[in-house]
Every structure is written in C-alpha cells, then in structure tokens.
Image (cartoon, rainbow, N blue to C red):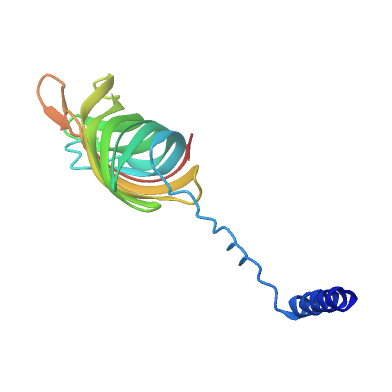
Amino acid sequence: MKKVLLAALMAGVASTAMAADLPSRKAPMAPAPVYAPPIFSWTGFYVGLNGGWGGSTGGGAFGSPSGGVVGGTVGYNYQIGQFVAGLEGDWDWADLNKNGVNVLGPYGNKVDDIVTARARAGVALDRALLYVTAGYGGADVKTSLPYIPYSSNDWRSGGAFGAGLEYAFTNNISAKAEYLYMPLSSQTFTDGVDRAKSDVNLSLVRAGLNYKF
C-alpha cells in the first residue's frame, strides 16, 4: 500500500513539473483602436468678412467708376453627398469713383454701397468647394452735375451672377475667392436740351474669410 501511494505521489509531482515546462497559451492582444477623423461637412450657418476691388464696365456718358470694397457676409449651406446648396447675402461699403466731362458738363459718379442676396450651388471636393451663384444685386449710386446744377442719389437694382472657390482650413474657418458681375438699372439725365445716360454694370473681385457655426 505504501508503495502504491508513493508511486502516485511521484507521478503527480512529475505531471506538475511537465505542465510547468509547457509553453503558456495566452489570448492574442486586441489591436489598438484606429482613430478616424470625422468627415467634413459644409452644412451650417456662417458669417464672414470680404474685401476686394470693384469697377463698372460700359458706364455710358458717366464713365466707369472703380475702387475698393469691404464688408460683411452671412449665409447658410446644406450638403447632400458632394452637392452643396445655400443662400448668401452681403453688404459692402464701396469707394468707387469717376470724374469727367460729358455733354452736360463736369460730373462726378460714385458708388457708395453694394448689396447682394444670392443662391449658391456647388460641388464639394472634401474641404474644397467649387460653386456658382446668382440672385439680386443693388448699389447706391451718387451722380453730381454742378453746371446744371443737379445731383442724384438713387438706388440701382439688378442681378448678381458669378462663381468662386472656397476652402475650409478647419471645421469652422474657410477662405474664398469669387467673381461677381452685377448688371444694374440705368439712369438718364438731361438739362432740357442734351441727354446723358448713366450705366453702372459692376464687376467685383473679392476674397473672404468665413466662420461656420
């Protein structure tokens, strides 16, 4: 009996020693999580600043005023897939001037304020947005004719059409460059004998910086 117990004890010790020598089997480590940045979207309200140059083409008898513009922008975009649609409005203080002489004598022609309210539609290439735009355009035009004497301060309404490129540097801040053409209503002046027509068809080249909420 003692021999049997001794043999069993020695067999147990040997089995334990052999098990300790076997390689351990541990579960493989889980892979580290991979961070995927959120997909950028143009959807949202935004406000911004813009500035650039404006000039009139085909100014008629009152020449083509030109000069600088600077102002503010507000708008909203909505993105579906790569298509982006939105509305944008802006007001610019302008310093567009032209002085000269026509059949009515010396004149001064000046554009003080420019306003647009437009729809935008474009294609988003990730953080780049190529767009076209169209809508309402208007400007405050001041015309002076000291020899009549006569002066006019009238609001000229018309359209606004153009295209641009906007790029988002962060999820909130983007910069844009755009061109707008604004054909506005004309005005005719007379001294009772001669007549002179004033056309103001504006071209705007602007850069802007927007903040999206």
Residue 192, image quadrant: top left
In the foreground, 55 or 15: 15
Residue at left offset 43%, top offset 47%? 40
In the foreground, 60 or 48: 48
Residue 191, image quadrant: top left
* Residue 209 appears in view: yes
Provide residue 136's location: percent of width, then percent of height.
23, 29
Left/right placement of residue 194 relative to residue 21 reads: left
Residue at left offset 46%, top offset 46%? 174
Left/right placement of residue 189 relative to residue 152 reads: left
Provide residue 145's location: percent of width, then percent of height.
27, 25
In the foreground, 30 or 152: 30
Provide residue 139's location: percent of width, then percent of height.
29, 28
Quarter of the rendering occupied by the N terminus: bottom right
In the foreground, 146 or 89: 89
Residue 106, image quadrant: top left
Residue at left offset 70%, top offset 78%? 23
Number of labels in the image equals 0
* Residue 63 appears in view: no
Left/right placement of residue 5 relative to residue 19 reads: right
